[in-house]
Image (tube, rainbow, N blue to C red):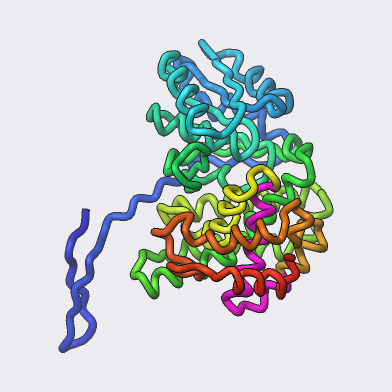
Amino acid sequence: MARLIWYYKDVKDWCVVLESIHRIILPSKVIIGPGAIKSIGEIVNEVAGRSKNIGVVTGENTYRIGGRIVEEYLGGHSKVETWIAGDASISTAEKISLKARENNIGLVIGVGGGRVIDVAKYIAFKNNIDVVSVPLAPSHDGIASPFASLKGTSRPTSIYTRTPFAIIADTDLISTAPRRLILSGVGDLLGKLVAVKDWRLAHKLKGEYYGEYAAQLALLSAKHVLKYHELIGSGSREGLRILVEALISSGVAMCIAGSSRPASGSEHLFSHALDLVAPGRALHGEQVALGTIIMLYIYGDSRWRLVRDVMQRIGLPTTARDLGFSSEEVVKALTIAHTIRPERYTILGETGLTQEAAYRILRETGII
């Protein structure tokens, strides 16, 4: 829906502005800290009440770490169904979604990493119910956003699903996550330095909607981890809390923007291209961090060296070999990255990079 409004500029000049409705759906509750999981009953009662059936989506490992705890705290509810999501595919999400409908589930809780929470958000969307996000690994900003990345679609992309009603981030539980997953969260946030530049570029060249507030909020998340990278890299509880809060902030930026634009640009396209060329080699955040170095270099932004230095200090891989990719695989990914989401304009343009240009960029940044 849109309406025309007249905006007065000066005595002799009026201009017509097309004002469109922009809906912003934000998480209602965010609870972070040691022992935060204990508040799950309170949150569930607030959104579902004791009369509604609850669905818990988790993974095999994450069930032992947090899923079982959630079940215990929900013991007073009439019915709690727990499903193990073996992967983050459309088919798995659809199967569980059907089971949720058959069991008259009124609220779904995702307990685990980003993939499990993505499945939970999709189930909530398909059944028009609320979802609570209980992250056990701070690997990417999907823990608070309405977007999900599920396998099995025609091409890698983000699906608009459901904004979590609440996020419960228990730092005691999250601290047990493998260090590699924690660093992956840092890598995902570094990508916002590129994503926002791409968003501005698309606004200038293609007339795409651009929201300054959402952009600055996403940038703040990236700048925050740059500032506190040593604290986060130390594995301290304080550093972990900073990381989790920054991931949630980035997710909220997507809620405000109504798209993944402030958090996903050409660095994410590169990551998705790597998934096509050589799937399963590296974590999402690790690939995004590598893409951030590349795209900042292409922009002529000298911060690519700062990002690379920070990654090296905390232990994020900065070369293709570190992540198990060959030079040929990374070059190919970079040359096809622009085709992943052709409707999303980025610094890669509409024709992308030649093989020669990709090879030169990767050599000059030290990635190969």
| Residue at 42% over, 69% down | 202
Front position in the image: 123 or 275: 275
Give the image location of residue 140, x and y in percent.
62, 48
Residue 344 is drawn in which quadrant? Answer: bottom left
Give the image location of residue 59, x and y in percent.
65, 27
Front position in the image: 366 or 82: 366
Left or right: 66 in relation to 157: right
Vertical relation: 145 (above or below) 361: above
Quarter containing the C terminus? bottom right
Give the image location of residue 168, x and y in percent.
61, 37
Is residue 342 something that shows in the picture?
yes
Is residue 249 something that shows in the picture?
no
Give the image location of residue 175, x and y in percent.
77, 40
| Residue at 51% over, 51% down | 252
Left or right: 269 in relation to 190: left
Identify the magenta region.
Answer: 282-306
Vertical relation: 195 (above or below) 48: below
Let me know if residue 301 is in the magenta part. yes
| Residue at 60% over, 28% down | 40
The chief SS type of the magenta part is helix
Front position in the image: 196 or 14: 196
Left or right: 118 in relation to 33: left
Residue 31 is drawn in which quadrant? Answer: top right
